[in-house]
Image (cartoon, rainbow, N blue to C red):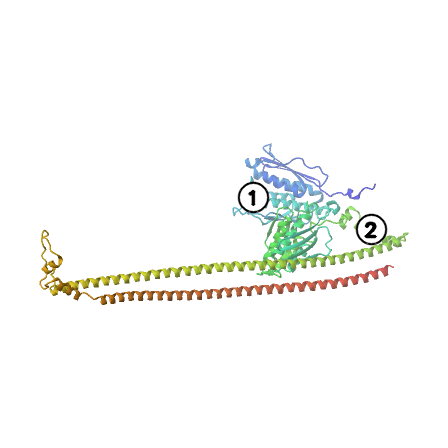
């Protein structure tokens, strides 16, 4: 059995490096080895007496694929791992300086056998922090700009645990000096001191590994794995909500030359997805509530694309976890830094408001930022977007920024893609297979070589190859026709579903409007009823007050009449008595001499006669009294007159009450008529508004139906034309093959 040539692959690697540095009281020993090679790896841990610095140096192991060992002694005593002995003993500054010098010397010794050349750059994001680090092996200048370390306090933190943040620059400077390289480190953004320092050490580790791989001749960090090794990474995801129906398909391993199908209903979103999917195969279709606005469609599409990409990446085996790329579109230039960290965060300084725009064609500018945010969060990645501003350049428009950012986020040569075959890279095949021609290309050219040298049966093989080629061509055309039929069916289903949704929406809208109108009428009726009740109560109160006032007036009049009658009777009595005195028929009270009570009185007539001096007898007294008293006719006349006045006053009161009741009823009838007219006007206005809305909706529905019918006619004509072309081509190919 022949040995698989892939098993003889030799991964280019480095050896080991060792350096020792001593100070007044401290001695440090650092050992470094390339963990990807066969060299023996150091067995000692990282223990420099500063726990946070141990954690930072371990980033060289995790992100630089190295094996680093650090040991430190103070006064002959070994500092313990996972401890802060150096900080407690007050020698942390000396330890940090010696660790940087020894680490740089050990790295230089390891790289001596194959020292890199040129300049290398790497950017690492860590949540909100982003650092830019460059290593230049042709010069030895050092520029470090990391302060302040954090935003709280504004001046930055002084310590992270037992590690003083000022020692970061000391360590990096010593490493660069001993390694004899130029080092430029710049903090682009960051509010957390821990994240800033850790991102810096990760940037150094990955930049160093990139330089080592370049010196070893490895492209993009080494050979790429085939889909057979890592499995297919193809995902189709559907998302349905009240507002949208979305179908997304992502294939990370499909050839980027495969035509893409993106139809979301918004030109700007389609362009954004095409730029975003330039390095992978992306298919997207969306049927959403475009008659409202673009918000739901843009948001749900980007959420689904992010989820599909996250699901397609799976365990992320064979992918480059961190990467950065720049892209330009028109006058916009954007730098994108990405980390497949499962820690979703988007940090962006893109000036969307550079030209004070509200819309980017058919999508609002605010939704462009929200689109990237939805994609990043659902893809579970950390992404930093940095706008590159050349001097003298004008502010780009929002659409150019979005397309440049999408191109930079997933460029055509991204770390997501894997070769369909491991021999697909010409340089890799040359190094590990001894030829620049891929295996598939060698197999394809074998028949031509056989035919040219006259190998027996070569003509039959060539003819069979031509037949197979035509068969594949027919199958490809058939597949295209099936795709067109599928698209037409999908469009028809989408149209039917859209019409159903429009009908359901219109029904719900009409029901809502009817309910709203009913509630409004009920509320208005209740308000009018309350107002009528208030008016009625007010009028009843006024009527009761008026009735009470009339009753009091009548009582006062009756009392006045009674008082006047009593006064008249009293006056008549007084006049009668004074007349008697004047006539001498009686005496005044002063002239009357009281009789002794013991004497026996005579009858009253005789006593009266005794008191008078002019009346001779009782008969004359009676006659005189009768002459003074009114007659019966006079008494009847006065009584009738009094009764007639009372009747007249009652009749006048009844007439007044009837008149008031008539006026009150007339006012109520007028108010009721006004209320009915007001309700009729309101009902007419509501009906007119409802008819106007229904006419607008009907016109919109008719326009959509006409547009869909036109699309269907165009698709049918195109399909018929393609079928005719296919039949003609098939006939011509058969004639040529025969």
State which quadrant residue 349 falls in.
Answer: bottom right
Within the image, what quadrant is residue 406 found in? Answer: bottom right
Q: Is residue 155 above or below residue 294?
A: above
- Residue 208 vertical position relative to residue 91 in the rendered view, above or below: below
Q: Earlier along the polypeptide chain: callout 2 or callout 1?
A: 1
Residue closer to the observer: 218 or 493 = 493
- Indicate left or right for 576 with 234 as reference: left
Side (left or right) of 419 relative to 169: right
The reply to whether residue 482 is visible in this rendering is yes
Crowd rating for badge 1 (residues with CA inside 10 Å; few <14, some 14–19, many 20+): some
Residue 100 in view of the camera: no
Quarter of the image with the N terminus in it: top right
Q: Which callout, 2 or 1, points to the residue nearer the camera?
A: 2
Q: Are marks 2 and 1 in contact (CB under 8 Å)?
A: no
* Quadrant where the image shows the C terminus: bottom right
Residue 462, percent from left and from top: 86, 55
Q: Nearer the viewer, residue 711 or 687?
A: 687
Q: Element at badge 1?
A: loop
Looking at the picture, does residue 606 appear above or below residue 181? below
Q: Residue under circle 2?
A: 443
Left or right: 150 in relation to 5: left
Q: CA distance from mark 2 to mark 1?
A: 61 Å
Q: Which mark is residue 232?
A: none
Which residue is depicted at the point 47% across and 59% down?
527
Q: Secondary structure at mark 2?
A: helix
Position of residue 68 measured from the top left corner of the image (x, y, whole percent): 65, 39
Left or right, 332 with respect to 729, comes to left
Residue 516 lies, in percent from the top left, at: 54, 59
Residue carrying label 1: 166
Q: Residue 699: x and y, percent?
A: 62, 65
Quarter location, residue 7? top right
Task: Give the crowd class for mark 2: few <14, some 14-19, many >=20 residues within 10 Å.
Answer: few
């Amino acid at each position: 059995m022949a040995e698989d040539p892939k098993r003889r692959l030799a991964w280019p690697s480095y050896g080991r490096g060792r350096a020792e540095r001593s100070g007044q009281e401290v001695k440090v020993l650092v050992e470094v080895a390339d963990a990807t090679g066969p060299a023996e790896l150091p067995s000692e841990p990282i223990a420099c007496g500063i726990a946070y610095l141990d954690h930072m140096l371990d980033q060289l192991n995790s992100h630089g694929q190295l094996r680093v060992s650090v040991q430190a002694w103070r006064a002959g005593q070994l500092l313990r791992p996972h401890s802060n002995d150096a900080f407690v003993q007050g020698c942390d500054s000396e330890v940090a300086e010696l660790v940087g010098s020894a680490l740089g010397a050990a790295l230089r010794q390891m790289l001596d056998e194959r020292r890199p050349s040129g300049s290398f750059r790497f950017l690492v994001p860590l949540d909100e922090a982003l650092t830019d680090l460059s290593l230049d092996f042709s010069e030895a200048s050092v520029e470090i700009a990391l302060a302040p370390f954090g935003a709280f306090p504004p001046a930055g933190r002084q310590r992270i645990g037992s590690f003083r943040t000022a020692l970061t620059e000391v360590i990096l400077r010593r490493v660069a000096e001993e390694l004899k390289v130029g080092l430029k480190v710049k903090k682009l953004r960051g509010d957390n001191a821990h994240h800033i320092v850790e991102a810096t050490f990760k940037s150094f580790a990955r930049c160093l590994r990139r330089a080592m791989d370049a010196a070893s001749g490895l492209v993009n960090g080494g050979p790429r794995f085939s889909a057979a090794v890592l499995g297919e990474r193809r995902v189709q995801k559907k998302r349905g909500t009240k507002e949208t129906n979305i179908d997304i398909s992502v294939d990370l391993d499909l050839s980027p030359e495969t035509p893409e199908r993106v139809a979301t209903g918004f030109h700007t979103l389609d362009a954004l997805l095409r730029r975003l999917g330039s390095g992978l195969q992306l298919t997207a279709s969306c049927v959403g509530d475009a008659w409202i606005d673009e918000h739901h469609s843009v948001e749900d599409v980007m959420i689904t694309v992010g989820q599909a990409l996250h699901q397609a990446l799976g365990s992320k085996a064979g992918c480059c976890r961190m990467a950065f790329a720049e892209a330009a579109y028109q006058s916009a230039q954007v730098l994108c830094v990405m980390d497949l960290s499962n820690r979703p965060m988007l940090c962006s300084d893109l000036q969307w408001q550079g030209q004070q725009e509200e819309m980017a064609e058919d999508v609002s500018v605010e939704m462009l930022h929200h689109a990237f945010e939805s994609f990043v969060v659902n893809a579970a990645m950390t992404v930093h977007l940095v706008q590159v501003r050349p001097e003298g350049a004008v502010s780009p428009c929002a659409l150019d920024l979005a397309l440049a950012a999408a191109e930079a986020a997933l460029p055509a040569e991204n770390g997501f893609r894997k070769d369909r075959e491991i021999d697909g890279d010409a340089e890799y095949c040359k190094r590990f297979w001894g030829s620049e021609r891929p295996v598939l290309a060698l197999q394809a050219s074998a028949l031509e070589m056989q035919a040219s040298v006259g190998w027996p049966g070569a003509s039959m093989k060539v003819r069979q190859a031509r037949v197979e080629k035509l068969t594949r061509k027919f199958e490809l055309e058939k597949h295209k026709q099936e795709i067109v039929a599928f698209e037409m069916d999908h469009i028809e289903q989408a149209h039917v579903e859209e019409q159903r949704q429009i009908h359901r929406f219109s029904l719900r809208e009409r029901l809502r409007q009817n309910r709203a109108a009913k509630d409004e009428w009920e509320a208005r009726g209740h308000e009018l009823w309350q107002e009528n009740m208030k008016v009625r109560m007010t009028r009843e109160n006024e009527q009761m007050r008026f009735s009470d006032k009339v009753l009091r007036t009548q009582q006062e009049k009756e009392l006045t009449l009674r008082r006047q009658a009593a006064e008249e009777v009293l006056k008549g009595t007084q006049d009668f008595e004074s007349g008697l005195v004047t006539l001498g028929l009686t005496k005044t009270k002063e002239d009357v001499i009281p009789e002794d009570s013991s004497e026996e009185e005579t009858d009253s007539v005789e006593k009266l006669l005794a008191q008078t001096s002019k009346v001779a007898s009782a008969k004359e007294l009676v006659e005189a009294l009768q002459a003074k008293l009114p007659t019966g006719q006079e008494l009847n006349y006065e009584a009738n007159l009094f009764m007639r006045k009372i009747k007249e006053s009652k009749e006048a009161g009844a007439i007044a009450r009837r008149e008031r009741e008539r006026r009150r009823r007339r006012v109520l009838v007028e108010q009721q008529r006004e209320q009915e007219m007001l309700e009729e006007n309101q009902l007419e206005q509501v009906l007119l508004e409802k008819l106007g809305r229904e006419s607008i909706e009907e016109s919109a529905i008719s326009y959509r139906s006409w547009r869909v019918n036109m699309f269907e006619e165009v698709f049918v004509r195109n399909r018929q034309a393609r079928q005719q072309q296919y039949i003609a081509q098939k006939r011509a190919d058969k004639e040529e093959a025969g």
